[in-house]
Amino acid sequence: SLNEQITQPDSLHIDTITVTHVSCNGGNDGSAIATVTGGTQSYTYSWSGGSETNLVAGVYTSTITDANGCITSEDFTVTEPPAISIQFIRDSVTCIGGSDGMATAIVSGGTGSHYLLWDDGSTSTIVNTFDAGFHTLTVTDDNGCTFIDSIEILEPSQSIEIDSLIISEITCHDADNASITVLATGGQTPYLYSNTNGVFTQNGIGFINLSPNQYIMYV
């Protein structure tokens, strides 16, 4: 008699699939590496995305075929970070031609820390030295992903002007009962009024009980 030992290869098995996820939202730099054991070498690799590189975010299947035609497969997922986004809070320039406009940037998404660069070179989330117009912000995250957006800083439609003064003269000697009413337009309300070179101010448009003097009115 003759004894013959018949053997079989180990089960073909995908031990691990090492995934490199997409670095930037909407990118295609994902990749995967399958580690295979068992079966009969050599192995043929097939990927549902057509390749194991240049993958966008999604679910894929890796299929392995050995030299004997045995097949095994396994699914894997490639993810991507959320898109970088910017929410702006703004405050207009106080006066025409001024540079005290403010913008605050609230940044979300991306990976890790956010690095800001405004068009004037500022790198903070709050800038309060803007003139009127559009200002651009570039945000970069730890993966080198960038997002660019802009905010418009406004200014008053016209400068503040004193349109007219309504003056009531003193009626009698030493009566000190003169008055001046200031009518102003433009700028941004509410106004503050002064007849003391800005030393003292008031909300009302009228100045009463004035004595003889020269008054310079400020708004």
Image (spheres, helix red, strand yellow):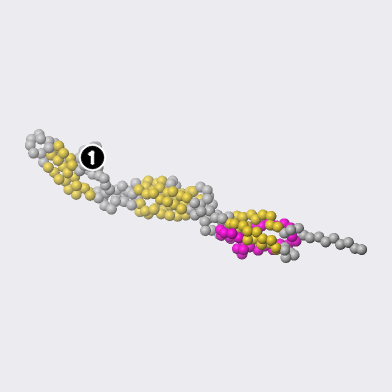
User: Residue 43: horizontal and vertical position, in percent?
Assistant: 71, 62
Q: Which quadrant of the view contains residue 16?
A: bottom right
Q: Amino acid at mark 1?
A: Gln
User: Residue 202: horizontal and vertical position, in percent?
Assistant: 23, 40
Nearest the eye: 51 or 215? 51
Magenta stretch contains residue 55: yes
Q: Residue 52, can we see it?
A: no
The residue that label 1 is drawn on is 202
Residue lying farthest right?
1
The correct choice, above or below, for 210 with respect to 189 in the image is above
Q: Residue at x 26, y 52 (%)?
A: 158
Q: Residue at x 58, y 57 (%)?
A: 78
Nearest the eye: 30 or 15? 15
Nearest the eye: 154 or 198? 154
Q: Residue at x 26, y 49 (%)?
A: 187
User: Residue 26: horizontal and vertical position, in percent?
Assistant: 52, 58
Q: State the extent of the magenta-drawn residues as a range.
A: 33-60
